[in-house]
Image: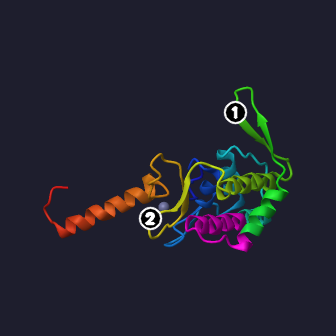
Amino acid sequence: MDARFPEFRLGKVLATSFTATLTERCGDPVERIPVPQRLIDWLAVNDLVVESCTAAQLDLARELRESLHAALTAAALREPLPASAVHVINDRSVHGRAAAVLTPENTRHWRLRPASGVVDALGVIAADAIGILAGERDGRLALCASPTCRAAFFDTSRSRTRRWCEMNTCGNREKKARFHANQRKNPGAVP
Ligand SMILES: [Zn+2]
């Protein structure tokens, strides 16, 4: 992990983990893949190992990310998906040539082309999002309750009542804010 760059917010769902490489979209945005090497690092963490990434490929990745954000947000609000976002998602999906390979340990490994690894990886991410947007997966799309975040997340909890994209960050911050507000209203009260 390179200390010069913001660390990653990793979730269990590939598509929304990817949109979380830009956080606090409604506050002070934090770009977590500011340089091509950080996209390489993020992909490696997600078993999408690529050898190289150009500045142009990073742009393609960020364009996909923002298109996913727009489409997932619209879906969470039960609004029509923006046509431009659908176009970009489909374009990245069509151009990917990743192959799913079963390992002897019964895990899935993505085999990517050496020179076009990023293109293939973006195809995998786009296909993951298509599965969610098409309603093929068990879960509920929702928007984070944090007013500075509002990230779209995929709630797979049994009760489907998750309120935050991530409990450790947005959830805790909201709880602390509520606690301090109560303290001000009720000084001296035992929490
Ligand atoms: Zn959030």
Q: In which quadrant of the rendered image does the C terminus lie?
A: bottom left
Q: Residue at x 46, y 58 (%)?
A: 164
The percent position of residue 127, horizontal first and vertical second, equals 73, 54
Q: Earlier in the sequence, mark 1 or mark 2?
A: 1
Give whichever of 71, 69 is nearer the camera: 71
Residue with the mark numbered 2? 145
Question: For the residues marked 1 and 2, what is the alpha-carbon distance in whole angstroms?
Answer: 34 Å
- Are the residues tagged 1 and 2 within 8 Å (C-beta)? no
Q: Residue at x 59, y 52 (%)?
A: 2
Instruction: Look at the image and give the residue range highlighted in magenta.
Output: 62-85
- Asked if the residue at label 2 sits under 8 Å from ligand 1, the reply is yes
Q: How busy is the neighbourhood of tag 2: few (under 14 within 10 Å), some, or many (20 plus)? A: some
Q: Is residue 38 magenta?
A: no
The percent position of residue 31, horizontal first and vertical second, equals 59, 65
Q: Is residue 170 left or right of residue 61?
A: left
Q: Mark number for residue 107? A: 1
The percent position of residue 27, horizontal first and vertical second, equals 49, 72
Q: Specify the principal SS of the magenta part.
A: helix
Disc 1 marks a residue whose amino acid type is Thr
- Seen in the picture, residue 115 relative to 180 is either above or below; the reply is above
Q: Residue at x 79, y 60 (%)?
A: 92
Residue 7 visible to the viewer: no
The percent position of residue 57, horizontal first and vertical second, equals 78, 62
Disc 2 marks a residue whose amino acid type is Ala
User: What number of labels is visible?
Assistant: 2
Q: Is residue 154 left or right of residue 99?
A: left
Q: Is residue 67 magenta?
A: yes
Q: How busy is the neighbourhood of tag 1: few (under 14 within 10 Å), some, or many (20 plus)? A: few
Give whichever of 63, 164 is nearer the camera: 164
Residue situated furthest top in the rendering? 104
